[in-house]
Image (tube, rainbow, N blue to C red):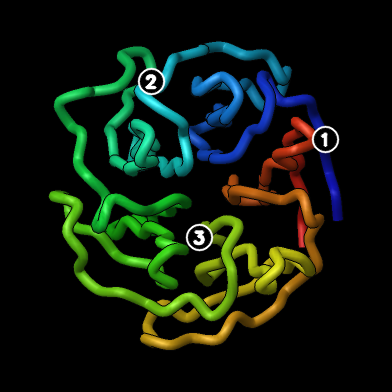
Amino acid sequence: MERERHAAPAGRPQPLALVGETLWVGSWDSDHLYAIDRQSWVVTDDVAAPGKPYGLAAIGGDLRVVVSIGEDDDRYLFRFTPGKGFDLSSKIPCPDFTGSHLAFGGTDLYLVQSTNGRIVQLDDAGSIVRAVALPTKCGGIGFGPGAFYMISADEEFDHLQLATLDLAHPNPAAVPVAEMSPDARGLAFDGARWWTSHREAGEIVSFTV
């Protein structure tokens, strides 16, 4: 059930992550990260990214950001600290220079590699600890109530669903939980609600299942 819908700070929002009451959103049109106070929907920070932001995950008070750089669309991981900005020395290439959505489960960081048809668990150096096969196309990942969740889509990226995925299984099935808008990209959970970007509409939406 949709709970809130707001205009994004800039066009084509995709990745989202939550740090306390702050929702961080990355825009493909501006290549910036924006901090939004969820209560007032006021932008409290606006930071240029070193490229196009594809994925965000909160680790404590920091963020990890997947950024696309250069004409070859190579993907890198950066550490970002609110109030300080991007640590350019933290730049790590994603495995095979590909990756998009990120999620952090308390101890482990996960990266979607749609090109390789998998989700990979990364260590602190950005190396692969293990890989889990993607059963469908993926529009976002996040940890929610008692499970790992993904936005599942068919081969044409239609018929989107919020689904659970058993990361303990090397070839898990996506178990549907709820239908989602075809515009949904990115996924974050605040403890009560899910948040997603309706990228082409330039909106941020919260919902409950």
Residue 2 horizontal side relative to residue 26, left or right: right
For the point 43% across and 15% down, the residue is 48
Amino acid on which the number 2 mark rests in the picture: Pro
Where is residue 149 drawn, in percent x and y?
Answer: 56, 66
Circle nearer the N terminus (2, 1)? 1
Look at 74% across and 42% down and name the residue there.
198
In the picture of the structure, the residue carrying the numbered disc 2 is 82
Q: CA distance from mark 2 to mark 3?
A: 22 Å
Quarter that holds the C terminus: bottom right
Residue 197's quadrant in the figure?
top right
Q: Are marks 2 and 1 in contact (CB under 8 Å)?
A: no
Residue at the spot of label 1 = 5
Question: Against 170, is 131 above or below?
Answer: above
Mark 3 lies on residue: 143
- Mark 2 or mark 3: name the one nearer the start of the chain: 2
Judged from the image, the secondary structure of the residue bearing numbered disc 1 is strand
State the image coordinates of residue 18 (x, y, percent, origin top left): 52, 37
Residue under the point 72% across and 74% down = 177
Q: Residues within 10 Å of mark 3 (few under 14, many from 20)?
A: many
The Cα atoms of the two marked residues, 3 and 1, are separated by: 21 Å
Q: Earlier in the sequence, mark 3 or mark 1?
A: 1
Q: Amino acid at mark 1?
A: Arg
